[in-house]
Amino acid sequence: MVKKFIYFGLIVAVLCSCSYSVYSNAYPHLKKVAIRPFENRSTEFEIGDIIYNELVKQFQEDGRLKLVTQQPDCVIEGTILKWEEDVYSYDSWNNVQDYMLRLTCSVVFTDLINNQIIYENKNLVLTEPYAVSSASTAKCRSKEEAIDELVSQLFKNIVQNSLETW
């Protein structure tokens, strides 16, 4: 009898947990999103395509909004204003230890159903260091990892300021 009660409790718990999500959606009417390629005003030719492709990948993995090219409920647009890669730190022998990537962009998240801007930041600055020396303490061990991390920060910034309400 006790086993049946435990099994029943486990089944109820599993079924109830299937509908639970840690994500919140402040705009439940938004189901489909279009991400427009960012206009690139920087001197780094390929960065616009890299950011666009990685941002698309982040939204696909997240799954809250379906990516579409036609008839979206909302749209994300942006402009890369500046892309910088500067020396961030040196070791004791004056060798470069870390570089700092800095992305400055403008981002707009627009609700096309209600025709309103949900989130806009005209001067969003994101930074991420990366290592070029084994003595470095930077989290990212390559420029590619640092770019991925910057795009992840961009994605989180957009989602936290638009879809999530905590």
Image (cartoon, rainbow, N blue to C red):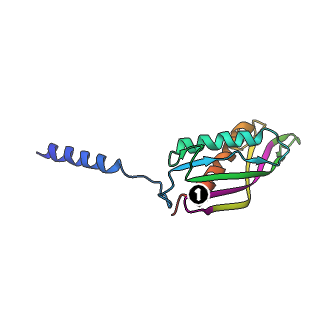
Q: Any magenta on residue 111?
A: yes
Q: Nearer the viewer, residue 40 or 127?
A: 40
Q: Which of 49 and 1 is in front in this view?
A: 49
Residue 110 in view of the camera = yes
* Whether residue 162 is situated above or below residue 83 in the rendered picture: below
* Whether residue 19 is situated above or below residue 162 in the rendered picture: above
Compared across the picture, whether 78 is left or right of 93 comes to: left
Q: Any magenta on residue 135?
A: no
The image shows a total of numbered marks equal to 1
Compared across the picture, whether 16 is left or right of 127 comes to: left
x then y, percent, for residue 20: 38, 52
Q: What element carries label 1?
A: loop
What's the residue type where badge 1 is placed? Leu
Q: Which residue is drawn at 87% across and 39% down?
A: 95
Q: Give the range drawn in magenta.
A: 98-118
| Residue identified by numbered label 1 | 112
Q: Nearer the viewer, residue 58 or 32?
A: 32
x then y, percent, for residue 123: 75, 60
* Whether residue 114 is situated above or below residue 17 in the rendered picture: below
Q: Residue at x 47, y 58 (%)?
A: 28
